[in-house]
Image (spheres, grey):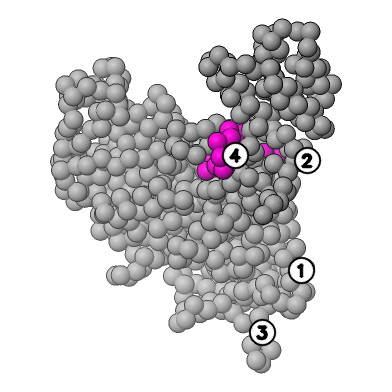
Amino acid sequence: MKRDSRQPRVVIEQLSPRIGVGRHPVKRRLGDSLEVGADIYTDGHDLIGARIRYRPPGESRWQYAPLRYHYEPDRWTGSLVLDSLGRWTFEVEAWPDVFGTWRADLRKRLEAGQNVRQELLVGAALLERAAASARRPRKQILAIARRARDPDSDVETRIDVLLAEDLLELVAGPLEPAQLARSTPLLEVTVDRERGSVGAWYEMFPRSQSPVPGVHGSFADAERRLSEIAELGFDVVYLPPIHPIGRTHRKGPNNTPGASETDPGSPWAIGGPEGGHTAVNPELGDLEDFEHFVQAAKRLGIEVALDYALQCSPDHPWVREHPEWFQKRPDGSIHYAENPPKKYQDIYPLDFWCEDREALWAACRDIFLFWMERGVRIFRVDNPHTKPFAFWEWCIREVQREHPDVVFLAEAFTRPKRMYGLAKVGFTQSYTYFTWKNTWWELHDYMRDLTTTDVAEYFRPNFFVNTPDILHEYLQRGGRPAFRVRLLLAGTLSPSYGIYSGFELCENTPARVGSEEYLDSEKYQIVQRDWNAPGHIKDDIAALNRVRRESPALQHLTNLAFLDTSNREILCYRRYAPGNELLIAVNLDPRAPQEALVEVPLEKLGLGPDQSYRLVDLLTGEEYTWRGPKGYVRLDPRERPGHVFRIDTRGRP
């Protein structure tokens, strides 16, 4: 049977990095190298040529990077530097390296002392075939072919011409288009800026920032707090919704129905006579005041993240202007939000599959664009898993096509596959289950899932230690030591973490026994605080954020290795980066001192079995000397919840 010459002989399989069948992009940070690998093989004994074919964002022309044969049989690897934001496209090309195979055979014949005059003519013919490609320097290659055929030249000269190293660059690629194989489908990688994967977040309600008890705070009041937030080392200040709050069915303190005239209501009940998602609550100020707040934060090195909640109060202008955008009950009334048996009469959900969905989707996208024009480049998206995934995939791509620096944080406390699905369709990072992982086994298993599986290719965790909705039992019962423990874990296990204001004061009173809601929740009322109240942990926060900024090892996710300890109440792990070896030990028991022997990976640190080495605790500056494969730690949570050691393998930190 005659072989169809149009079918490439080379097989390309197991391309990486790749998520599933390749429908969704992997994620990387600006400046990263994208390491590409593939299994590539062919029939017979021909050599193979292979390369990465890629296109940066906004570029129409393809570029190329070489693939090299790996030590693993039939595995090829290569890399390219991701030096621009946005979505890159890439694939792998491979072909039988006919000319390279001929050159390799020629060398073997020469070593065996064979007559190679006929082989030189074969080589010249291959060059003539290669010159037919429009991508190659035709005249230069044909000139070399003529020299290889020149009967007046001696054999040695013709051999040197055909074995010249620079000749390989001239004829790189398949001799004919039909020989070229390409991987399918085309793959993508989303390249984000640093804040997409690294940062310390601080959540605060502007309305609670007034220094006068009982007085509604403003953007100006919130601006006055920015210097302290900067001194604590935070990179992002996140504001819950700043829009007008509806009056209809407004919620009172502790989520009670029937608010009084003075109750401020829940900021998530968005919309009133003053406007909707593109307006600000007049009690906070106006748009100019907000823009001033954003610029003040920027001068201090802080970015402002804005809450994006796609829901409306009954007083939102959309209810009057676009009633077709909402779900209706049989009696024609608009369906308010429910999570049976809970009822949220102050909120109307949107109907994303209504007949006028194109206009609705465009309006939702335009909310992002509106606030981006006012300096916002980070959005915390409320409950995205309750809206269509198709909408998010479209909307995020629409925004990032022109603005690839925009960061989207998914507030999605839902089932794992749905959380991961949101990351796949475009969300930059996500809230996690960290608040519910408190034991050695829980943390060990959860971090293994996040860092050692393909989830790490697309899911970026943000370890918020608390939220206005989540006050975990661990904090309720563990008191101040528990807050210090959870802070240290969050800031050293994930490159992105956050706290909700009040955490630094160790606020831990629940609404009732068995509840994770705060008593007198700030979601429904103004809360004034004494930010220097006794027992605060602001020094811990400032020290941790300083260490995070100074330590490259804490700015990556997958460079984590857990270490064995003799006591499961002490969690110990290694974080490593070139020139930055960290060993972190944390007491998980907030009630009692714990001690343990730690297994130190001497071989990976380049240390001998009897070699001494020094450690400096980056939080306190204290120095220790260890020798051998076991180190001893004792941690009293009331005094010191943990160590962040930098290991000096030369004997001095």
Q: Which residues, given as a range, are shown in magenta?
A: 36-60
Of 590 and 62, nearer the camera is 62
Mark 4 closeness class: few <14, some 14–19, many ≥20 residues within 10 Å: some
Query: Residue 60: which numbered mark, if any?
Result: 2
Mark 4 or 2 closer to N-term?
Answer: 2
Mark 1 or 3 closer to N-term?
Answer: 3
Q: How far apart in space, not on screen, are marks 2 and 3 (Cα)?
A: 47 Å
Residue topped by disc 1: 358
The amino acid marked with disc number 1 is Glu
Query: Residue 193: which numbered mark, if any?
Result: 4
Q: Check disc 2 and report its element: helix, strand or loop.
A: loop
**Is residue 483 positioned above or below 337 on the image?**
above
Q: Is residue 70 magenta?
A: no
Q: Is residue 40 magenta?
A: yes
Q: How far apart in space, not on screen, are marks 1 and 4 (Cα)?
A: 30 Å
The amino acid marked with disc number 4 is Arg
Q: How far apart in space, not on screen, are marks 4 and 3 (Cα)?
A: 42 Å
